Amino acid sequence: MNSIHFTYLLILAMLLWGGGWSALKIITPNISMEVILFWRFFIMSLSFIPIIIFFKKSFNININSLKYILTSSVLNILFMVFSFYGIKYGTAGSGGVIITTLTPIMTFFLVAIIFKKRLRNIQYFGLFIGTIGSVVLLQLNDLTLFLNSSNIYFLLCAITWAGVTMLSQHSQKYIDPIHYSFLISIIATISTFIYAYDSNITMVFNEGFKFWTALIYLALFGQTIATTIFFIASGKLGSEKTSSFMFLVPLFALIIAWVVLDENVEFHILVGGFISIIAVFFINKSK
C-alpha cells in the first residue's frame, strides 16, 4: 500500500473513532467500569482472530517487542479507565474533541522531549498555538472549574494515547502491528478479568439491543479495526503525521453525538478545537 491508501484508511479509522464516543456514552450509565473494560477487551480479542487468519502472517514474538506490548497494555487499560470516567461525567462530543485534538500535540511534545528532536520555528509556533487551544478546551483559565469537571480525565486520555502512539511506531521494528494489537488486547483481557471477576461480569446479559449494539461497535469497529489501522499507519507514516489525522475525529464525534445523543455543542469546545486543529497544521507543516 502507498501513502494515499493509508490516507483513506486513516479517514475511515477516524470516522469509526468518532462514533466510538457516542457508543461509550450509551453503555456507561448502567454498568460498572471494570465490567465494561473486560467485555470491551474480550470482544476485541475475539475479533482479532479472523483478521489474523485472513492476513496469514507468521506469529513470531521477538523478545525486544515484549516491553512495548506490556507497556502499551497498561496504557490502553489506563486510557479506557480515563475515557470511561470522562464520558460518565462529561459529554461524548467534548471527549471526542478534547482527546483527539490534544493527542497530536502531546505526541509531538513526547517525541521532541524523549528523542531530543530539534524543532523548526514554525513547529514551536504550532506548539504555542496548541497551548492556547488547550487552555480554551480544558477551561484552564479557571482551575477550580477544570478540577471539578470531566476535562481532567480527557487530558489524561490525551497524554496516555500519545504514549500509545509513540510506542506503536517503534514496536514495528520487532513485531507485526496486527499481532501487536492482538497481544495487547489479550493481556488487557486477562488483567481486566482478574479485576472484574468479583463484580458480576454476567450483568451485561441483562442489557438490551441498544447496549449490545454500542458495545460491539465500540470493541469491533471503534477499537479492533480503527486501532489496527492506526498502528499500521503510524509505522508507515510516522507517529506525528499519523496522529495529525486525529483532527478529523472531533468533527465526526460532534456530528454523531448530535445525531445519536442529541447533545448540544459547547462554545468553548468549538473554539478550542478549532485553535488546536490550526496548531496541528503548523506542527506537521513540512516547510
Image (cartoon, rainbow, N blue to C red):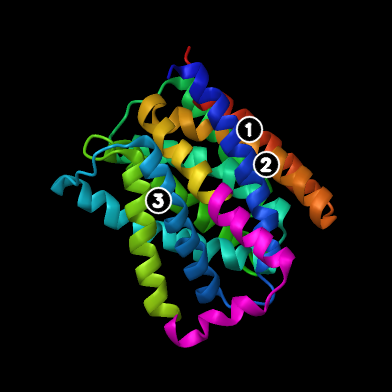
What's the mark number on residue 154? none
Q: Quadrant of the N terminus?
A: top left
Task: Say which residue label 2 marks.
Answer: 250
Which one is earlier in the sequence, the residue at label 1 or at label 2? 2
Judged by depth in the image, the label closer to the viewer, 1 or 3, is 3
What's the mark number on residue 49? 3
Residue 282 appears left or right of 24: left
In the displayed structure, 141 sits above or below 35; it is above
Residue 42 appears left or right of 167: right
Of the residues shown, which amino acid type is indicated by label 2?
Pro
In the displayed structure, 189 sits above or below 59; it is below
Q: Label 2 near label 1: C-beta < 8 Å? A: yes
Q: Which residues, given as a range, are shown in magenta?
A: 197-221
Report the number of numbered marks: 3
Task: Say which residue label 1 marks.
Answer: 277
Judged by depth in the image, the label closer to the viewer, 3 or 2, is 3
Taking the spot 39% from the left edge, 57% from the top edge, the residue there is: 185
Residue situated in front as seen by the camera: 176 or 166: 176
Question: In what element is the residue under mark 3?
Answer: helix
